[in-house]
Image (cartoon, coloured by chain):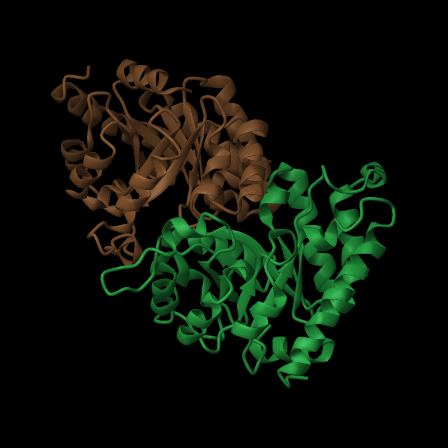
Chain colours: A green, B brown
């Protein structure tokens, strides 16, 4: 999916919500455990319930890998289900990969060729040749970690170099030598508040994937105030607050209500910015 | 496996070689493709041939994930095979994971509990709470990326802060607040030469996992000169140069010869350092 198509979807649905499919067998409603593939059954119900209110889904690979082979099957079925039934949804494999060139190329083959997923989160620590193998796929995206939502983001990402440039700023600046706003996005945590201003000075036009609203406590209003662009430029993720809104047999309806609520707030933000 | 047991294995086998199981379906000998599980068949033959000469195996997850469900099955079978037949081998899942706390905890469960693997490579960019969930498992290890073997390692890892401390040095220093030489090792590329001296100033006793000899061109002799400790302190990995030494039906014998050659060089280094 290219940038223009993504923006069209955002305008049409008045939403820039991504639903994080962090599906944990220990947290899904008990009645699903009798299904042949409980993880996929849960995802399918969540997707059917929330698709009208979001423009992207983000399965976090850790949750699937933790179940070994069964988890991979559930992951692949989930991706196929979205692609077949909701082809306008942008799919993000939240994998935080990044390795030496020939290994990153293997990952690119997996996620972009075999699974035909739109985008993949990538860690920047290993530098250019760990990222570039992902960039040669038409319509596919690298989503590079820049300033994450967790407490540990302060340990290294905020370290200033001799010129006063912080590491996350260097990641934003340097990576533009390899990529552009048509094949790269950045992860910026919603918990980072006014840092979005600093980020927009370096990447005024790139889409940002913003985790951290909901369970992690970030503010949608603040993210929009400091991070929104004329083309929206934001994909805001919520995982736990939506998919685990209710743990009874009513879980899908509760997820729908929660996603609908966030979509309404997003529509207001898009209107205030005169995007819709 | 604890540090003392690892050191005993190194002395007994006069080797600190790790064989990297970067098994690519496109590179294995053609006659194996008729096997039910060609990847596992290849790994099994390589393991049986090389086990006397090495003390560790390092499957890189990218190669297995690139084959989806089949790849995960081959990965799990490989780990089980090593554990059952060669229980003195240290197993490294080269996965370069690292995510927010609850997600890293999922990865820890997968690799340390379910697969009972000895160690996992982890990327440091997201800081403390992305690493600590891996540290609470007795006898298990985090192998944190510090200074990698690839060209892109220069992009961010060498960035100096205001006090002149480079990022990889900060990673080494900071991470010792969370872990110690009994549950953490570091990745340092063999291509980094005299940088090993700087690294040993910060982590004099930690084991280092050293990729980059063989196909990537690093020198074993140099790594030993600047990186070896009285307890060896090195696990040196070779992947392609051993497992793809020959692509005919003779591949396992060729891998054995190659591993044997490296082991001899290592025995000399251990003798020179009066470790054996």
Q: Is residue A77 above or below residue B201?
A: below
* Residue at 61% over, 57% down: A115
Which residue corresponds to the image point at 26% horizontal and 41% vertical from the top-left?
B214
**Quadrant of the rendered structure where residue B34 is?**
top right
Q: Position of residue B4 (x, y in %)?
A: 33, 16
- Which of B87 and B136 lies nearest the eye of the viewer? B136
- Whether residue B137 appears in this view of the structure is yes
User: Of B194 and A233, which appears nearest the observer?
Assistant: A233
Q: Could you say where residue B270 lies in the image, as x and y percent from the top left? A: 18, 21
Q: Position of residue A31 (x, y in %)?
A: 85, 39
Give the left or right position of residue A58, taking residue B112 as reference: right
**Circle count:** 0
Asked whether A9 or B219 is in front, the reply is A9
| Residue positioned 35% across, 69% down in the render | A173
Q: Residue lying farthest bottom?
A: A274
Q: Is residue A65 above or below residue B47?
A: below
Q: Which quadrant holds the N terminus of chain B? A: top left
Q: Is residue B197 above or below residue B114?
A: below
* Residue A221 appears left or right of B129: right
Residue A86 seen in render: no
- Identify the residue at horizontal 31%, vertical 14% (top origin): B8
- The quarter holding residue A237 reads bottom right
């Amino acid at each position: 999916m290219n940038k223009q198509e993504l923006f069209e979807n955002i305008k049409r649905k008045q939403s820039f919500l991504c639903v994080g499919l962090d599906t944990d067998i220990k947290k899904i409603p008990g009645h699903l455990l009798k299904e042949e593939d409980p993880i996929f059954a849960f995802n399918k119900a969540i997707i059917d319930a929330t698709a009208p209110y979001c423009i992207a889904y983000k399965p976090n690979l850790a949750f699937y890998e933790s179940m070994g082979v069964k988890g991979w099957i559930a992951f692949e079925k989930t991706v196929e289900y979205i692609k077949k039934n909701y082809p306008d949804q942008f799919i993000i494999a939240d994998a935080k990969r990044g390795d030496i060139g020939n290994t990153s190329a293997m990952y690119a083959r997996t996620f972009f060729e075999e699974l035909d997923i739109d985008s993949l989160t990538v860690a920047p620590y290993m530098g250019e040749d760990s990222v570039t193998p992902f960039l040669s796929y038409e319509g596919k995206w690298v989503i590079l970690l820049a300033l994450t939502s967790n407490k540990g983001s302060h340990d290294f990402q905020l370290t200033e170099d001799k010129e006063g440039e912080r590491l996350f700023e260097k990641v934003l600046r340097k990576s533009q030598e390899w990529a552009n706003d048509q094949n790269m996005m950045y992860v910026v945590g919603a918990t980072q508040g006014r840092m979005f201003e600093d980020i927009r000075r370096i990447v005024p036009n790139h889409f940002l994937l913003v985790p951290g609203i909901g369970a992690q406590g970030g503010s949608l209003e603040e993210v929009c105030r400091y991070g929104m662009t004329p083309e929206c430029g934001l994909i805001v993720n919520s995982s736990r607050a939506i998919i685990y809104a209710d743990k009874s047999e009513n879980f899908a309806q509760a997820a729908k209500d929660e996603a609908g609520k966030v979509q309404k707030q997003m529509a207001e933000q898009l209107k205030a910015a005169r995007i819709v």
